[in-house]
Each structure stands twice: as C-alpha cells, then as structure tokens.
Image (cartoon, helix red, strand yellow):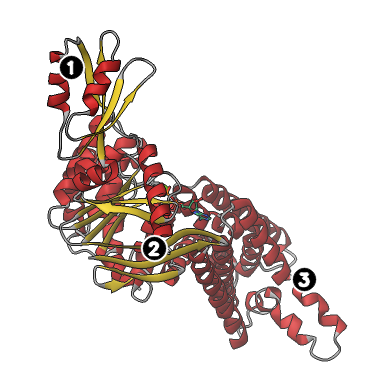
Amino acid sequence: MRNIWIIAKREYNHYFISPIAYVVAVALLLLTGGYFSLMLFAANQSGSFGGFVPEISEVNNLFGFLLLLSIPALTMRVIADETRSGAIELLLTAPIRDFELIAGKWLGSFLFVLTLISVTLLYLIILSPQVTPHPDWKLAASSYIGLILLAGALIALGVGISAIFSNQVTAFIATFGLFIFLWWLIGAPASLFPVGGDFFTYMTINAHFGDTLSQGNFYLTDLTYFLSLIAIGLFTGTLAIEIRRWK
Amino acid sequence: MIQVSGLIKDYGARRALNSISFNANQGEIVGFLGPNGAGKTTTMRILTGYMPPTDGTIIVAGHNVVEESLEVRKRVGYLPETVPLYNEMTAFEYLKFMGQLRRLPNVEERALETLDTVNLDARAHSYIGTFSKGMRQRIGLAQALLHRPEVLILDEPTIGLDPNQVAEIREVIREIGKDRTVLFSTHILSEAQQICDRVLIINKGKIVAEDTPENLQSKLVGAQQVILRVRGDSDDLAEKIKKIKGVKRVEKKEDNSIEFEFSVGQDARPLVAKTAVQGGYDLLEMRTASMSLEEIFLELTRESASSVKKSS
Ligand SMILES: Nc1ncnc2c1ncn2[C@@H]1O[C@H](COP(=O)(O)OP(=O)(O)O)[C@@H](O)[C@H]1O
Ligand SMILES: [Mg+2]
C-alpha cells in the first residue's frame, strides 16, 4: 500500500507541471463554470415565473460528459512518459509489484481529477442560498458520488490502455474510442433483443451515470458497475506491464 | 553473490543469449566486456529482474531472480544504459523518491550522503534537467548506490563521458567494489583491464573468455608481438633474430620493418636489441604491437570455434 502511495504522490505532483493537465483543467473549469453561470442567469430570469430550479447535478452531468475527452488526454502519457525517459527500467527493477505501479499511477491521476471536481463545490456554495428552501441535497450527493465513480473508472481504463501502448497518440485514440463505445455503442444491440437486451443497456456507462446517479438514484448495481471497471482497468494495466517484461 | 548458469534469452525467434554461465563473488569487480549487440544489456536486465530469462538458473544475492524477483531487486543497485532520470525533479527529490520506494530509513539523510559520494552535494537542489551528461551519469550512479546494495550492476557507466569524468566514475566503482559485488559492462578493453578483478568477454550471446585481466592478456595474445625498425636493409637481421631463444615468428614487412613474436614470460626484446646493435644496425624503433579489441574477438571466436570442433 505504501508503494502505491509513493507512486501516486509523484504522479499527482507531476500533473501540476504538465501542460496538457493545465489545458484540461482550464477547459473543464471554464466550460462547467460558464455553464453554471448561464444556469444561474436563466434561473434568475425565469425566477419571476417560478419555473426553473438550478441543480448542481446539471453541472456534474456536463463535467462527467467532458471527462470522456479529458481523461484520455490525461492518462495517455502515464506509462508512455516513463518508457520514453527510460525511467520505466528503474520502476520495473525497484522492489515494487507491477500492480502497485499501476495502482499508484491510477491513484495519482484520480486524486488530480478529484481536485478538479472539488472546485465545483464552489458552485454549490454559490448556489445554495439562491435556491429556496434549499438545494436537493440527496440529488447533489448522488451526482457527486456518480461523478467520482465515473472518473475513477475512466482513469483506470485509461491507465490500463496507456500501459498497452507506448505511443501517446495511439493510447489517446484507443482510450477515447473505448469510452465512446462504453457510453453509447455497447447499448445499441439492446433494441435488437426482445429478451436479454437489458444486459446491453446495463453495460453502458450512461445507464449508471446519466440515468441514475446524476438523477439522484443510487443503486448498488451502479457501484458494482464502476468498481468492476476500475478492477478491469487496473488488471489490464498490470497484465500489460507483465507482458512488456516478456517481450 | 551472482551465480548464472545456462542463461538463455530469446527475443522472438532470435537468440540473444546462448547459454551463459558465470559467477561473481563478494568483493569482486567483474567486467563484462563485449562489442555492441553482444548481449551485455540483456544479461543485466535479467539479473536485475527487469525481464525474465527464457531458460537458466540465476541466483543474485542469494535469491532466484525468477521466483523471488522482489527479494533480488531489494538487494541490487542498477544503473541502466539509458540513465533513467526525472528532469523535473531536483537531484535530492529524485533520490528521496527512490529511497522511499526502497523503504529506506532516514531517507533524506541518506540521499544527501549519497550525493556526497558522487560529488553532487553542491547541486542537490538543482533540477536534473539542467545537469550535464557527466552529472546525469553520477546521479544515476547515486540512485544505484542509495540503498547500499550487496550487488551493483552498472551498464556502460562511463559511456559518453570525458576522461576526467571517466576517471571519477572509475574511482567510485573501485571504492564500492572493495566490499561489494560489482558487475559492470564496457566495450573498452583497457577500462576492463584497469578496474576489474576478473573479466568476462561476451560475444554474440556467448562468453568466450573469462579470467583475470593479466591472464587474459597472455592467454589471448599467447605471444607478444613486437615491431622493430632499423635503418637500411634488414634481411640479415631478420635471419639473426630467428635464431634467438624464445622468438617464435619473424616476419619481414614491406616497409622494411621486422615484426617478431615471443612467448609471454620469455621476453626476447633485450637480446634482439643487443643483436641489432652488435650487428651494426641503427636501431630506430622497437614497439609492441597491441591487439585491438576487434582482433581479440576475432581471435577468441576462432578459438572457441576450433575448440568446439575438437570436443565433438
Ligand atoms: N527488446 C529487444 N527486442 C529484440 N531484440 C533485442 C532487444 N534488445 C536487444 N535485442 C537484441 O539482442 C542482442 C543483444 O543486445 P544487447 O543485450 O543490447 O547487447 P549489448 O548491450 O551488449 O550491446 C542484439 O542483437 C539486439 O539487437
Ligand atoms: Mg548495451
């Protein structure tokens, strides 16, 4: 566990000197911030009609959607950088397990994205006095849980893929492709099967984030789904490192 | 400390290491000498647990590299051929990170001590990205020394350095080698001869010779070759030299110089010189013709090929 933490700490610090990480952070915060401002503006306009109530879950929804493009940009270099600098030889001959290396890389990236997510708590603080009687706390909590689980799962898959490809561009495309596939495409066959089609729907990220967690519904299956993705991503990464050694 | 027997490594269909066996004991500096592509890096990567062997038994610091990889890695310091550094870290931060991964007590203190060992203490808080090639090599070496490993494996530690830096690194290696096992690779014969207690010569994935530098020299060369030059015609002198005791081969060269060989331990040079002078020749030059590394490899590979034939 301590090894994971040491790797994670370096990875986390590394993001603060990485240009791509800055671009991603600025883009994420600008877009969600802009969206939030628009939402407040619209609410104030429609306030007199007593209609639209802004919710933080809307912002988190957008955040989650933007992660589809942001995470591949963040994780594509996780292993590729080490390979290019030759430091991979150091890490693979240090007394740490391959799993610890991958899990540390995952944790460091996850903590960085959590840092970005935590900025949106500011929106919630701005929002809460404006909503009467108060924001839907249950909805807010569940949408944050959803966003965090989503980020954890996408990062795990991204790190796993980055361990397979030592070329960053390839890693980016493969990761982004996988996310698109999991978000929508895998659910496409659902309508083709009158019986058992639910399985395909269950496999989509959207079924667990967009349709439930970010709507204020928390089911155990959602938790299981995201934790499984994390496990698959970390396992794939570890396996890829092991295969790399044999080549 | 290092026991390798029957080590084989295949990259796909290509055999990079073909049944390598050798030992290295505590307090011994072993030089791994061979041309590019011989298999030095591959061997070292297997010894350090970076990649598994295709076949063979390898024990390093008392543990099997395949079955107890982590135990081996704890006890080995490794400087890879491409020095693995993080440019965005300071020398101190980098060593601290490595020390934490190795779970050292008093990491910070140890990092500073080690920087001192490699003469980088003044640059402890400079970014590695600003370091010169020699400094990068030294911080790489510091990383390998940090945990005071029982076994030190250095892959071409002096490559690309200027003579002063080479001398410094050699000094550090010799110092460490006093009580630990050091295996270091090089493709420079004289370097291996200067530092090592024992030299392993590797070529095309096979160990073709193994001995102390001195024995190797005499075994390899078998005889020492000397080139002699006198003023004027030297035909008669060549005939006279042939009769001198210990002289094995005399050859008259086109440029009128004479090349002769004598067995090691039977230095014929004083007698040859006397003969020349007494014969009234003006002695212009007498020098030993040393074999180049290429010639030595040619020699060795020829020898091993013929010894294979003999034994079959
Ligand atoms: N990762 C690899 N994949 C395929 N072949 C390799 C790989 N690494 C080394 N080789 C080959 O194995 C042989 C030995 O290489 P190496 O161990 O690097 O030699 P040295 O370090 O003595 O120069 C070379 O012919 C090289 O081309
Ligand atoms: Mg090499």
Residue A221 horizontal side relative to residue B185, left or right: right
Percent x, y for residue B93?
29, 50
Q: How many angstroms separate mark 3 from mark 2 (CA)?
A: 67 Å
Above-or-below relation of B103 to B119? below
Residue A57 horizontal side relative to residue B303, left or right: right
Above-or-below relation of A158 to B275? below
Percent x, y for residue A16?
44, 50
Toward the viewer: A209 or A243?
A243
Percent x, y for residue B229?
26, 16
Above-or-below relation of A234 to A171? below
1 or 3: mark nearer the eye: 1
Query: The C terminus of chain B appears in which quarter of the rendering?
Result: bottom left
- The 10 Å Cα crowd at callout 3, few under 14, some 14 to 19, many 20 or more, is some
Residue that numbered label 2 is attached to: B311
Quarter assignment of residue A28: bottom right
The chain to which mark 1 is attached is: B
- At 27% from the left and 48% from the top, the residue drawn is B141
Numbered circle sitting on residue B276: 1
1 or 2: mark nearer the eye: 1
Q: Which amino acid does label 2 sit on?
A: Ser
Toward the viewer: A52 or A55?
A55
Percent x, y for residue A198?
77, 86
Q: How many angstroms separate mark 1 from mark 3 (CA)?
A: 94 Å
- The 10 Å Cα crowd at callout 1, few under 14, some 14 to 19, many 20 or more, is many
Q: Which amino acid does label 1 sit on?
A: Ala
Residue that numbered label 3 is attached to: A185
- At 38% from the left and 73% from the top, the residue drawn is B66
- Local SS, label 1: helix
Q: How many angstroms separate mark 1 from mark 2 (CA)?
A: 44 Å
3 or 2: mark nearer the eye: 2
The chain to which mark 3 is attached is: A
Residue A58 horizontal side relative to residue B83, left or right: right
